[in-house]
């Protein structure tokens, strides 16, 4: 049996693939930046918590990743597919 840590380290293994990847994501409300140059990768099987004080940009980040807001700068993807592609070209799972 393979441990979770070993599965993540193996190249080409689904458990080690990026389930969500965000690169250089920025968003502003007028002249005020809510997010500036945010980047992170969450691998399949990882448990991640987003914490921060009021006004830190948690809801804005969630809204951008789920496309409630359209990003103005930066990109990201899920399961190896870019999420900044036009909505018609994205596949639903």
Image (cartoon, rainbow, N blue to C red):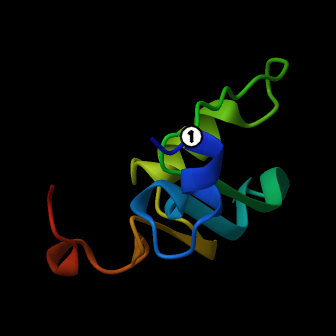
Left/right placement of residue 2 relative to residue 48 reads: left
Left/right placement of residue 84 relative to residue 74 reads: left
Left/right placement of residue 32 relative to residue 62 reads: right
Classify 60 as above or below 65. Answer: above
Residue drawn at the location 40% of the way across and 47% of the way down: 68
Residue furthest front as drawn: 1
Residue furthest top as drawn: 54
Packing grade of label 1 (10 A; few <14, some 14-19, many >=20) is few
Residue 55 image offset from top left, x and y in percent: 80, 27
Residue drawn at the location 39% of the way across and 65% of the way down: 79
**Residue 91 location, quadrant:** bottom left
Q: Quadrant of the N terminus?
A: top left
Of the pair 79 and 69, the residue shown nearer to us: 79
Of the pair 90 and 47, the residue shown nearer to us: 47
Residue 49 image offset from top left, x and y in percent: 67, 26
The number of callouts visible is: 1
Say which residue label 1 marks. 3
Classify 91 as above or below 55. Answer: below
Residue drawn at the location 58% of the way across and 63% of the way down: 21
Of the pair 93 and 59, the residue shown nearer to us: 93
Residue 29 image offset from top left, x and y in percent: 70, 51
Circle 1 — which element? loop
Q: Quadrant of the C terminus?
A: bottom left
Residue drawn at the location 78% of the way across and 52% of the way down: 35
**Residue 83 location, quadrant:** bottom left
Residue 90 image offset from top left, x and y in percent: 22, 73
Classify 1 as above or below 55. Answer: below
Classify 76 as above or below 52. Answer: below
């Amino acid at each position: 049996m393979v441990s979770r840590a070993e599965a993540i380290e193996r190249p080409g293994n689904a458990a080690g693939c990026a389930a969500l990847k965000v690169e250089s994501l920025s968003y502003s409300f007028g002249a005020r930046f809510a997010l500036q140059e945010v980047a992170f990768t969450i691998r399949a099987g990882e448990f991640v918590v987003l914490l921060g004080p009021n006004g830190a940009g948690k809801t804005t980040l969630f809204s951008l990743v789920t496309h409630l807001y359209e990003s103005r700068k930066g990109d990201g993807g899920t399961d190896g597919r870019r999420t900044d592609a036009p909505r018609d070209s994205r596949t639903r799972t």
